[in-house]
Image (spheres, helix red, strand yellow):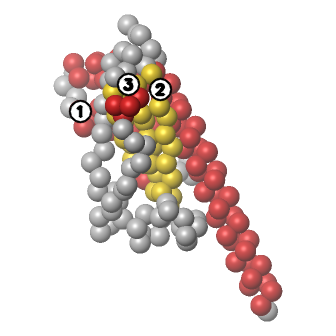
Amino acid sequence: MELPSRLTRRLHRTLTTSLAYLAQEALESAVQVAARGVVTGQAQASDVKGSSTGMTSAQLAERFRINGCAALPSFMSCSRLYVDVKSAATGAGLGSNAMPLTFDGNGKPSNAFSYDLGTQGSMVMIRFIYLWPMRVAPTAGTKAGSTGQTVLMATSVAKSEVYT
């Protein structure tokens, strides 16, 4: 009776890890789609139009996040996606890629995320942070505190083009 149980646990761990890798690759693809819109100026142009109709910075950031969700596969929930966007004149101005996350009592990040698409020629760093609802590796440094979730993160850094 021991063998099937051990085999079942091993199979479960293998499938859990495989799904997390699939989700990570989907997140990487989604951040690249979002970055393409920033590099070409489409996202900035959309924000200019949104601002002229009275949208606040928080509403523009939420619209960007929702557009990012559209690039995720259906098995990934939009409510688990967080977005951080920073811009600077040079890559050094973006600072470190390290982003320590802190969590509230409900297991949600309590960090203040940025939303700054920059202007033409800016270096822009876009991070998609996704809370995967399973613990993948108990010793990994990607655990979301004691929430039983794993933090998946995809980052894109690029210089925005000259756009009109």
Three-letter code for the amino acid on which mark 1 is drawn: Ser
Q: Is residue 50 shown left or right of residue 15?
A: left
Specify the quadrant that holds the N terminus: bottom right
Q: Earlier in the sequence, mark 1 or mark 3?
A: 1
Q: How many numbered badges does the structure rendering display?
A: 3
Does dot 2 land on a helix, a strand or a loop?
A: strand
**Picture layout, residue 17 above or below residue 55:** below
Q: Which residue is mark 1?
A: 57
What residue lies at 36% left-to-right and 65% top-to-bottom? 107
Task: Say which mark, if any, is on residue 90.
Answer: 3
- Taking the spot 69% from the left edge, 64% from the top edge, the residue there is 15
Q: Is residue 152 visible?
A: yes
Looking at the picture, how far across and down is residue 114, in whole percent? 30, 39
| Rendered view: 85 above or below 82 | above
Label 3 secondary element: loop
- Point out the frontmost of discs 1 and 3: 3
Residue at horizontal 50%, vertical 24%? 36
Q: Provide the residue designation for mark 2.
A: 158
Camera-side mark, 2 or 1: 2
